[in-house]
Image (cartoon, grey):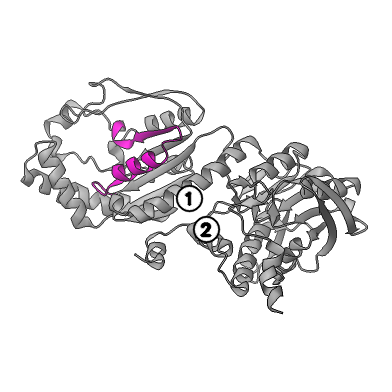
Amino acid sequence: MDSKSVVDMIEASSKAHFSGFHMNGVEPRTMGMKSVSRQPFVIGVCGGAASGKHTVCDMIIEQLRDQRVVLVNQDAFYHNLSTEELSRVREYNFDHPDAFDTEKLLSSMEKLNHGEAVDIPKYDYKSNMNNVLPSRRVNPADVILLEGILVFHDSRIRELMNMKIFVDTDPDVRLARRIRRDTNEKGRDIGVVLDQYSKFVKPAFDDFILPTKKYADIIIPNGGDNHVAIDLIVQHIRTKLGQHDLCKIYPNLYVIQSAFQIRGMHTLIRDSKTTKHDFVFYSDRLIRLVVEHGLGHLPFTEKQVITPTGSVYSGVDFCKRLCGVSVIRSGESMENALRACCKGIKIGKILIHREGDNGQQLIYEKLPLDISERHVLLLDPILGTGNSAVEAISLLIRKGVPESNIIFLNLISAPQGVNVVCKTFPRVKIVTSEIETGLNKDFRVIPGMGEFGDRYFGTDDDELQLL
């Protein structure tokens, strides 16, 4: 299977941070982002009956065995059937949203999200009751897999999820699996299975399950048979877990919630074989995303305008007191994106010389005279040890810039650098597109992307030797 077919198999929806309003002296607030403070990483796994959801969950759990992972099945939250419903159980639609006790599922998930153990019922398919078998105690975990045919149906449940996976399997395959499962494991007659499928299962899939596919961040064709896609997903989950853990610790750290398109761009700029032209092109795309997200954390004021139709539109006005500061020279690669987003913006310069492993020396600075009255976007694509960032931020604060008015924008951040900056300056916001594994013995970011400035401006050693 070639790389293109793998990419084609996996679709993802981008998610964005939205800035809040800044009105009447109220602090800016962020809208559209759920807090991840002290919460587990919740993965929703949805798809039609017999699509392979449980197999996908098992494979993810197996590969994440070094993490505390628990599985919660939506099937455990079926309503108990009444006496009348039991008398005509073959006419009961178990694939309809009303068949599930969604309130109880929501309550259980919220308790787990807050670090509380819960007792999950076990549904007995023979008696069609969930209070016959002993319940299952589920303890708090780092990762929660929530699996079921309709886990994307209720927006309140979706809001609890950090990642949403839809298992997309051919209807004929799902029907064949269902026949085999229900006849062998549940002892049902094949005619009853087919009758139930045509009456309830297929219509419910078309009406309630398939429409929720649009909410998925990742779509897996062929379920558990698609090992390549699941391997990619597990890698992505591991990356997001690292980001998630740091975001739980530092509320001033913002990591762009990436789709596989963003991860694909990261793959290209990290590849040592990527040409300079492609490196610059995809770096510029990622930088633009980071800049846009950074701007989303600036204060806005309410503004009303009259549209060409004569109607009133209530919107917001951009922050006017703004400037950029680039750390020479790799930070200069981010200036064009900032200028493209903010017309006529002033940009200052800081040059910091690295001395040994930890020493940093300020060599040059040229900043707007009124910088103390502005919000500052500090530009440097790589956050490694954090020493250069601390030196640059310290300079800005000495120039009178309030710590809370500084937003540090970068493409990749090492955990060590995040720790240093966030602990030293807890009110400085960091906006990045990916958290790295760490630093090597030479204090270089790994997996990293090499010397960014050399690759971006074409001054790497290999090219110089050819001149």
Residue 298 seen in render? no
Q: What element carries label 1?
A: helix
Q: Residues within 10 Å of mark 2 (few under 14, many from 20)?
A: some
Quarter placement of the N terminus: bottom left
Q: Does the magenta stretch include residue 271?
A: no
Disc nearer the start of the sequence (2/1): 1
Which residue is denoted by mark 2 in the rendering?
263
Label disc, if present, on residue 236 of the rendered structure: 1
The boundaries of the magenta stretch are 48-76
> Which amino acid is tagged 2?
Arg
The secondary element bearing badge 2 is classed as helix
Asked if residue 73 lies in the magenta stretch, the reply is yes
Residue 392, position as x, y percentages in the image: 82, 50
Residues at circles 2 and 1 in contact by the CB criterion of under 8 Å: yes
Q: Can residue 423 be seen in this view?
A: yes
Observer-nearest of 458 and 45: 458
Q: How far apart are marks 2 and 1 (CA)?
A: 8 Å
Between 133 and 432, the residue placed more toward the observer is 432
In the rendered image, residue 184, in percent from the top left (x then y), is placed at 11, 39
Residue shown at the point (61%, 55%) measured from the top left: 448
Judging depth in this view, the residue of 290 and 98 nearest the camera is: 290
